[in-house]
Image (cartoon, rainbow, N blue to C red):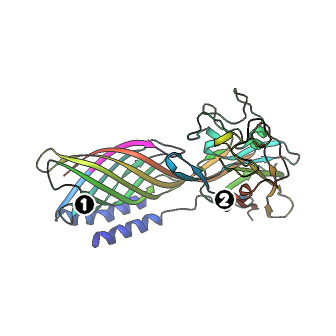
Amino acid sequence: MKSVFLILLQLMPAIAGLASESWRVEAMAGSGFDLSRPSATPLVVHAACRREVCDRLSLGAGAGLATCEKPLLPVFASLCFDLATRHRLVPFVMCNAGYAAALSGKANGGFCFSPSVGTSFKVCKKSSVLLTVGCDHLRYERLRSYASELVRAEFVEQLRHNVVTFKVGVEF
Amino acid sequence: MSLSILIMTLLGSLQSCSDDLLDYEQGDLKIRIEQGDNWLHRFDLPLGLSKRNAPQIAVWLEDTVGHYITTVYVTHKAATQDWQAAHGNRRPESLPHWSHSRGIVYPDGLCMPTRSQPLADGISGATPRGSFDLRLVPVDALKCFIVKVEVNHLTDFNDSFPKSATPGADNYSGGREGSGQPAVVYAARVDMASGQTRFEAALVGHSSPDGSSGDLTSDVSKLTSALKIVERIMVEIKR
């Protein structure tokens, strides 16, 4: 947990710095179905800040929480490209890539990558509703154990989840 | 620019959080299964697509006269019958020597665990994509035993075990979605009191091609790529 607090502390100056420029903040939540075996139904929640680097492209970073077999804290770089100029309805492609840290013991985090397509729908002057569909690739490892009267065994299971996810969120 | 540096710093610090999850103590056993050239095997999918499948594996212990003691590890798909696109095939040919050694017969007459009654004795886990280790701590009374490992690939056909083999033939291995070459079995006799610390498992034969029995055939001359799934299996006593 100590490392998690350190990460959040590291994120604060970046968010504060971005706030003074042209920036977008989003919060999203979603779930989906896992194509891999063993499968897990994940719940994904994340927030991201992105700076607009040109009319359609924004870059930034974010963090969130994902639950598969174990709770994970994904910290990622985020890129979003609007497929149309700013209208009420704007389709976009988004890609997040980074590292998902394991929050519980006996597990190690791993690479996470989630490309998606979606659309934003402006509901008032400064806020939009977001809908996305994408594929979350998540790798991490956990310790599996078994004990009987005769033997105790341990094995590091390397998990690779490929999840089709549907997310909904808001953007300010 | 500052954002890129921040992200790189973050990712670096997160990567360093990784721990070595297997922590050995003196007297523990380390079973190392090293991947061979055919560890990942091409499996054809519809529309001309394909994927690289890792093998099905079972690791278990027997006493020195060949009586089953306990299962240590079985790959998730075999342990829970979580096959993809199997069309109801229970794949008895995947790990027949292990499943028959356990001696548990399920309601359909097969020895492989079912979805409703998955493996309860031993670890089941995602199939490793490469070499991996198992940590084993036997009780003090278990001084001399045999570590057995059975390994098998789906659709690993060759000239001796073709896709076209018909049910009932000696080389029938489950048809188009079957095993192809049968599972191969390795064994290492471990004597904790011998003073020796490393025991290499030897290839002892192949299992029944169609999974109808738990018998072993010592003649492996008809096998080709099945012999290259595993490079080496080593059992080491930690000192």
Which quarter shows the C terminus of chain B?
bottom right
On screen, residue B191 versus residue B119, left or right, reads right
Nearer to me, A103 or B118: B118
Q: Which residues are magenta?
A: A27-38
Residue A57 screen position, x and y as percent: 23, 62
Q: Residues within 10 Å of mark 1 (few under 14, many from 20)?
A: many
Residue A149 in view of the camera: no
Answer with left or right where residue A108 lies relative to residue B134: left
Q: Could one spot residue B222 in this view of the protein? A: yes
* Number of marks in picture: 2
The picture places residue B136, in percent across and down from the top left corner, at 71, 53
Find disc 2 in the rendering and name its residue: B38
**Residue at the limit of the structure toward the right, as seen here:** B65
Q: Quadrant of residue A31?
A: top left
Residue A133 locus on image (x, y percent): 33, 46
Quarter holding the N terminus of chain B is bottom left
Amino acid type of disc 2? Asn
How many neighbours does mark 2 have within 10 angstroms: few (below 14), some (14-19), or many (20 or more)? some
The chain letter for the residue carrying disc 1 is A
Under mark 1, the amino acid is Arg
Chain letter belonging to callout 2: B
Closest to the observer, B23 or B207: B207
Mark 1 residue element: strand
Cα distance, mark 2 to mark 1? 45 Å
Which residue is identified by label 1? Answer: A50
Looking at the picture, tell me which residue is in the foreground, B113 or B22. B113
